[in-house]
Amino acid sequence: MITEPNTRIGRRQAIKVGGVTVSLAALVAACGENRGGDDAPGRVGNAPDVTAPQNFDVDSAVLLRTASSLEYTAIEVYETALGLDGAIPSELEPVVDRLIQDHQTVADQMVELTEAAGGEGWTTTNPWLMDRLVGPTLEKIQSDVVGVVTLDEDGSTRVQVLGELVDIAETVSTVNGELTATSSIDDVSEGDEISFSRLDGAVSADVLAFAQALESLATASHQELASAAESVEARTAHLEAATLEARHAAALAIAIGGSDGFVSPALVGREVAPTARGQIRHFAIESTFGETGQIEFKAGPGDVNAVRESVVLQTPAANSFVYNELEPDA
Amino acid sequence: MDLEPAERDVDTSLSRRSLVTAGGAAALGGLAAALLIDRTALAVEDDDEGSDRPNVPTDADAALLQQAIGLELAASELYRAKLEADGAEIVDPTAAQDDDASDEPITLSAVIGVMAENHQAFAQAISGATGLGAGESNADVVDANLAGFSGSDEEFFATAHALEQTASATHTALIAEYESDDAITITASIAITEARHATVLADLLGVADLGVLFGNDASALSLGDA
């Protein structure tokens, strides 16, 4: 026997049943007690606590102190990169020396303008950027590739690394090049991790991508500061710094991509594909107007599925301002 | 109340298509200007005493910006002359591209086309922000540079590099003169792209001197005197 579904609940009846349900829910809710509780938005997972930005005044001196802190941060990144073995190709070392010199010149000018605005010049890095951006990014760039030992279908152990399943060996081959183990491969079992050195040239490529993004960030920051500056001297100095650092960013884009780094394909109606190693491509001429939006690049090796982490740079805001109340050693 | 019939005093030589084109260009210029003039997060708090700077360009700003439009149109015209001399055309970025084309390197003509279009967009953005007409290109700038733009590739790279440096220096000098937020904001975004243009042209020219690559000793044009 075929039983047919009960089709006797009509639309009118459904509305009645629904109405009763809603009414009961409202009654129960109205009768409840202790309906207060935490007003904060719900949080899921283990994200770090939100840090409330400082509630200090923002004046011309704060903006200029922030500007000099960006310059010192760039210098710190370049000096660290020069100290990393092979991170800066030898032919680019004179360029990096010049970039450091230019950033120091701009920093000195920003300090001078800060003092002219009645503030105390800031002559060191931006603490927020160093803690939240520079430190973690440099750490990622220098970190090893991690593979995970996996059981193959035939019961043998292999290692999954950068999205590929390969035989366990001191040196393994992937589509992007060879990896050399930096941890023991003896007596490993399923679930164990094996570390490998990064692909040939990967650290250098990441450092240059970071430098290019940092120059674009400095450009965008000075562009915004030129609009925000109250004095004509500061306005002009910010625009001069912005055009200088735009030249730095453009030259680094060309150093990374050659003539393919001249113009974004998006400006001639093409898609902007990432590099073979998944890096986001940036260009000397990336947009028609100087942009102040966020700048994204990849840093560090891919995970076992070859997914690389993004780093996002944004122009200074409440959390990264160098307020007058901040002390350099705080 | 008497309603008088509207006088037919409009220029009827404008066809519907040219009206659409002109309207579209003005709208794009206005849109670009609106996007550029997004108020910055870095603005110093102006809630009580406030900045006494006006938002929209003053008459003094408008006089300078009109000259800046002429400079940008001249630059665009020069790049277009170079393309014409090379028998090349500007790539329309909104046109659908052949799938195979995405793997091909971007040609020098395409790079020149982007620079031509960028300068055109700068003029349109200034026009959109100020309400000034697009006006005409600066004939002196065209005359002074046309031979270089029409010469060999090397002459073109050198002349175009010098023009971009001059344009960037001119905007940097003008930013000190402006009284309004909008004039300052647009000028900053233009000068930065022109510095990027200059760097590409310096690379094409084979500049190895880092002082030339990153510096700019070009003199600003005295547009205010024009």
Image (cartoon, rainbow, N blue to C red):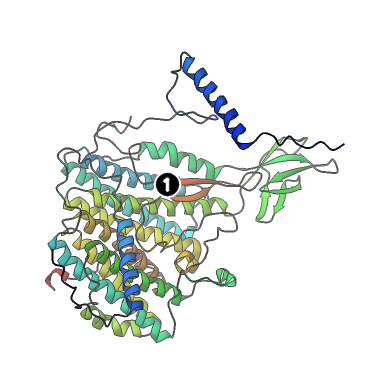
Picture mark count = 1
Residue A2 placement: quadrant? top right
Q: Is residue B98 among what the camera can see?
A: yes
Q: Is residue A66 left or right of residue A302?
A: left
Residue lying farthest to the right in this orientation: A1
Q: Is residue A278 left or right of residue B35?
A: right
Q: Residue at x 68, y 39 (%)?
A: A183
Where residue B184 appears, as percent x and y from the top left, is: 23, 57
Q: Residue at x 72, y 35 (%)?
A: A192
Residue A289 placement: quadrant? bottom left
Task: Name the kind of residue labelled 1 in the image.
Answer: Leu
Up-down relation of residue A163 to residue B5 (above or below): above
Up-down relation of residue A140 to residue B110 (above or below): above
For label 1, the residue is: A313
Q: Chain of mark 1?
A: A
Q: Residue at x 50, y 47 (%)?
A: A84
Q: Residue at x 25, y 52 (%)?
A: A226
Where residue A197 appears, as percent x and y from the top left, is: 63, 46
Q: Which is nearer the eye, A231 or B59?
A: B59
Up-down relation of residue A186 to residue B101 (above or below): above
Q: Is residue A92 left or right of residue A233?
A: right
